[in-house]
Amino acid sequence: MWKSQKYLQEIQKSAIEVDDYTCLNSYVREKRIVLLGESSHGVGDYYTEKIKMIQYLHEHHGFNVVVFENGLIESIKSRERISLEEPKLVLQQHFMDIYHNEEMLALLKESWAQNLILTGMDPQPMYREASTYYIKTIKNGLDEVTYELLQIAENQYFELDDQFLSTKLKHLKPKILTCINSYKELLDKAHLINELQQPLLFHKFLQNRIDWLTVNLKGLLSSGAARAKYMYKNVEWLLKFYRGEKLIIWAYNFHICKSKTWFNKLLRIQNVGYSLQKSRPEQSFTIGLYASSGHVASLYRNELEIKFHYKHHLENICNQSSEKSLFLPLNDSKYGAKKWLLFESGMRGNLPKRIKPKAHYDAIICLKNVRLPKYLPRKNTLNDESGNLEIKND
């Protein structure tokens, strides 16, 4: 019997066809953290299915906090702003471009989701409008001098953020250091501001500004490691801030996988999943999402068909195994310990990566017949040299 046939039969025996998410019960019952990855930000079904999983975990296992690959304070403030303004507007001003789609709106609008706490782990900013909204909400808790200093720092911050992609670091470094000092001055005052309803959030907001500016002081090869470090620090902070609550982390597979890839080792990146596996292995359950057929979008929103050119793609074996999407538990599986090619998206398309799934995830969900997200119109875009839309993103 040829090897692929053997693994196909093993997957058919152990995998669970996904009709609902009762398949998660025995795996998450004793966990505090569930990490939900995705091989691409450009799959509409990932958003739909993740939201179904969040609803199931919320209603049946008491998971109330959703942590996005998104700005911490921007995500938190999105919830209260939704009661005041159109959800589409809030989504586009408080969340990264990758989330700007119709599928995401369910998490903001549906009645069952209103009790969820939305937050983020990324130190990088989203959009100036979200900053403006937050500062307005805390204005009455700040003295005039502090409020003016905060406005000056935020103006400096967003002017710099607009230039990070287009200007050489050596030209920006003095401005970055000046802006960091402005936030450090505010941080020194933060513990004295007792009038704020949530002083710890204000403190974390300022620290995230400093962290992101510090990331941008690094060279290109070092900035990824710095960002990963600050994302993990934010997760640990959230676990303490929401003491007693269970967390769902929503991010790209790269950020949630529990072992280092060769790329991570090369750049000395310790991502969130890897760090949690070291600090809280018994509390965490990690699920990677992949697609076995259909179409995905690049970050430029170009449509790409999923095509397998090699028989050793795990998604291809899953596609042959069932007519439905599959949940693959990995801990006791032989196929989980074997090296497979799996698609992970890059800036312009799908790239095959060879990994041992069991080393990176506790389970994989492989979806069939996936489609592109129903995107909302884009804002704040730039044209790159090829005429494609270029945006700030993951």
Image (spheres, grey):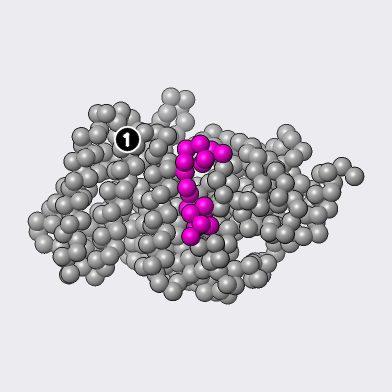
Tell me the amino acid under the disc marked 1: Phe
Q: Residue 280 in the image: x percent, y percent?
A: 50, 63
Q: Nearer the viewer, residue 109 or 320?
A: 320
Question: What kind of element bears circle 1?
Answer: loop
Q: Residue 357 in the image: x percent, y percent?
A: 66, 49
Along the horizontal axis of the image, is 225 left or right of 29? left
Residue closest to the far top: 385
Instruction: Give the extent of the magenta segment.
Output: 262-279
- Give the overall secondary structure of the magenta segment: helix
Q: Residue 379 in the image: x percent, y percent?
A: 38, 43
Q: Is residue 378 visible?
A: no
Instruction: Report the quarter where the N terminus lies.
Output: top right
Along the horizontal axis of the image, is 346 left or right of 358? left
Q: Nearer the viewer, residue 20 or 124?
A: 124
Instruction: Report the quarter where the C terminus lies.
Output: top left
Q: Is residue 227 visible?
A: yes
Residue holding disc 1? 164
